[in-house]
Amino acid sequence: MKEATSVIKDPVCGMTVNPATALHAERDGETFYFCSEHCRETFLSTPAGAKPENKAGGCCS
């Protein structure tokens, strides 16, 4: 029997990512997961409390 793999949405582009293998960053005690270094850097350069620009359909497609 296969174990279910959870997926989480990248907060910048909305792409689904596997938290076991995705890039990540922490902010205010919460861990966020990203599809690429570009999305991670965009998130980190956005002030806490502000929402990064969310591109429909993902940034990497």
Image: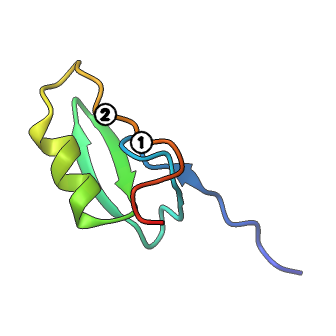
Colour setting? rainbow
Residue position marked by numbered label 2 in the rendering? 53
Residue drawn at point x = 22 percent, y = 36 percent: 27
Instruction: Give the secondary structure at mark 2.
Output: loop
Q: Which amino acid does label 2 sit on?
A: Glu
Where in the figure is residue 33, as x and y percent of width and height? Answer: 38, 53
Above or below 59: residue 44: above
Find the distance from the CA under tag 1 to the CA under tag 2. 6 Å
Instruction: Give the secondary structure at mark 1.
Output: loop
Where in the figure is residue 43, as x and y percent of width and height? Answer: 22, 42
Above or below 49: residue 2: below
Q: What residue type is labelled 1?
A: Lys
In depth, the one of 4 and 43 nearer the eye is: 43
Where in the figure is residue 28, as x and y percent of width and height? Answer: 22, 29
Residue position marked by numbered label 1 in the rendering? 55
User: Where is residue 2, by image quadrant?
Assistant: bottom right
Horizontal side, residue 41 vs residue 33: left or right: left
Residue drawn at point x = 24 percent, y = 54 percent: 40
Horizontal side, residue 47 vs residue 24: left or right: left
Q: Tell me if label 1 and label 2 are in contact, CB under 8 Å.
A: yes
Residue drawn at point x = 30 percent, y = 25 percent: 51
